[in-house]
Amino acid sequence: MRTALVALGALCAVLHAEATSPALGLRERVLSRLMVADFSKLPTVVQPRAQTERVPLLQARRSNFTPVVLMHGLGDAGSNPGMEQLARTVSDAYPGKVSLAVNVSNGFLSYITPMQAQVDEFAATVRADPRLAGGFDAVGLSQGGIIVRAYVEQYNDPPVRNLIGVSGVMNGVFNCPLMMQIIPFVCEIYETDPYALDFILGFSEYFVLSQNKSLYLSGNPFLPALNGQTTVNETYKRNFESLNSVTLGMALNDTVVYPKESEQFGGYAWGTKDTVFTMRQADFYESNSFGLRTLDEAGKVSMVQYEGDHLRFSDAWWNANILPRLAG
């Protein structure tokens, strides 16, 4: 299992290489402060743990199940034990069902690869697997949630039938996660211009600077486009509206995604850094700019939650709330 210490140590190496190029004040400043930061206090990057509870058999074996694709989160990998075990729970519950935890921007690459490139890699991966040609259900964990959401809007070929987010950053992040607050200067940069860091940190592209809407709209190349907050893309909207269902799982005690309501398309109100809005209060919901309201009004959006921190759901919760949604 990778730790945030290993990941940020590698980040120092990247920044050192950047600093040898023509001088850029921000890069040099980040480098100099990273070199003296105390990474020993950083906790392990949160990953789903391996299941220990027996998985229920939900349907008899058959050959025509819809496949399932799981996309990992930040710092994780499809080949890690927790992700592989989650994939196995699906095939255990539905014998004969194809269930894959894909290896896309694994480990440290999930930090430094631009979000659009990660979406493109996900698309190339699922398109290369003939078992998925007829469509699949997608489960995105943490950062994987916004990756599979973006795939639906931008590609959806092969099509996603049911979209599930588990602590998925569906509407981005609005504040530094607890693990990053241990190196405060990174948070200082995020509070002023997070998009200046997109040359090294992919997750800058789903950071929402709620105190400065104009900078968010002009500086963030990724999330505003998905939300239709700059220009409404009719293809994105049509693809999202084609989903059979959307399930949004939120961790009630999340210390990684701020606010936790982002996992259900909420966030912080413009001009504030702590006033929470929920999905139906969002500007993109009211304008129906990418089809979220269409699905919700059709009864196709479900919200579930669990006690615990980021991705620290129980086996029983997964078996009761996620596995039944992957039938068919």
Image (cartoon, rainbow, N blue to C red):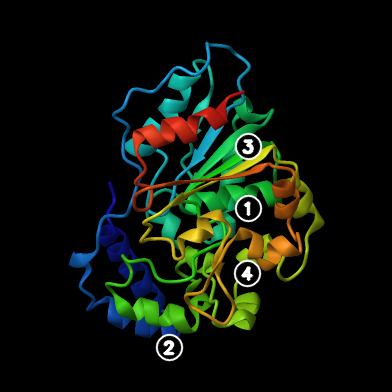
In the displayed structure, would residue 3 be above or below residue 180? Answer: above
Amino acid bearing label 2:
Gly
In the shown orientation, is residue 118 left or right of residue 217?
left
In the displayed structure, would residue 90 be above or below residue 138? Answer: above
Q: Quadrant of the C terminus?
A: top right
Mark toward the start of the polypeptide (2 vs 1): 2
User: Which residue is labeled 3 in the image?
Assistant: 162
Amino acid bearing label 1:
Ala
Which element carries disc 1, helix, strand or loop? helix
How crowded pointer 2 is (Cα within 10 Å; few <14, some 14-19, many 20+) is rated as few
- Residue 302 occupies quadrant: top right
Circle nearer the viewer, 2 or 1 = 1
Image location of residue 262, percent across then percent down: 52, 60
Answer yes or no: do the residues labelled 3 and 4 have beta carbons within 8 Å? no
User: Which residue is labeled 1 in the image?
Assistant: 150
Measure how far apart labels 2 and 3 are at the Cα level: 45 Å
Answer yes or no: do the residues labelled 4 and 1 have beta carbons within 8 Å? no
User: Which residue is labeled 2 in the image?
Assistant: 25
132, 86: nearer the viewer: 86
